[in-house]
Amino acid sequence: MEVVNTVGRRKAAIARVYLSEGNGQITINNKDVTVYFPSGILQYVVKQPLNAINAAEKFNIKAVLDGGGFKGQAEALRLAIARALVKVDAENKPALKVEGFLTRDAREVERKKPGRPKARKRFQFSKR
């Protein structure tokens, strides 16, 4: 099997994934997943697509993450892994789609508007 590469995005985070056959090793920016994401919850989020199709020990994943925060990066990586698994075998698509791993979450931070403290918040109104 050749190396399959895909891209996942979430908020300001971009994840580029290179998936190949292997023993289940996940490397992010040349670090192990447990070092890059010390939180168990974020490690779980990253491994969700692999666990959904029972392929946690079948593939090696090398990822390059850029931008955003740790939560956005983890979810971008989840999307990229799910897309790579569909590229490898199209029969994985229904199982991943039902779980919602193939949906790009398009919510972005709204820009700050001039004359306001935040995007929608207004300064306190004073009648007198």
Image (spheres, rainbow, N blue to C red):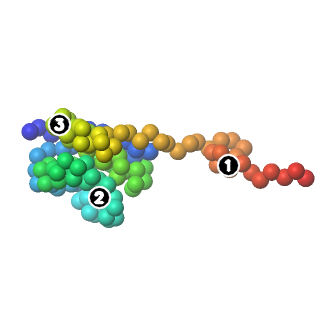
Tag on residue 121?
1
Q: Indicate which disc, 3 or 2, sits on the residue closer to the N terminus.
A: 2
Q: Residue at x 18, y 34 (%)?
A: 90
Q: Amino acid at mark 1?
A: Lys
Residue 3, image x and y in percent? 15, 39
Q: Amino acid at mark 2?
A: Tyr
Residue 1, can we see it? yes
Q: Nearer the viewer, residue 108 or 31?
A: 108
Q: Residue at x 23, y 37 (%)?
A: 93
Outermost left residue: 1
Tag on residue 44?
2
Marks 3 and 1: which is nearer the front? 3
Q: Quadrant of residue 38?
A: bottom left
Q: Residues within 10 Å of mark 2 (few under 14, many from 20)?
A: some
Residue 8, can we see it? no
Q: Residue at x 56, y 42 (%)?
A: 110
- Secondary structure of residue under mark 1: loop
Q: Quadrant of residue 98?
A: top left
Dots 3, 2 in contact, CB < 8 A: no
- Secondary structure of residue under mark 2: helix
Q: Amino acid at mark 3?
A: Glu
Tag on residue 91?
3
Q: Residue at x 72, y 48 (%)?
A: 122
Q: CA distance from mark 3 to mark 2?
A: 23 Å
Q: CA distance from mark 3 to mark 1?
A: 47 Å
Q: Nearer the viewer, residue 53 or 24?
A: 53
Dots 2, 1 in contact, CB < 8 A: no
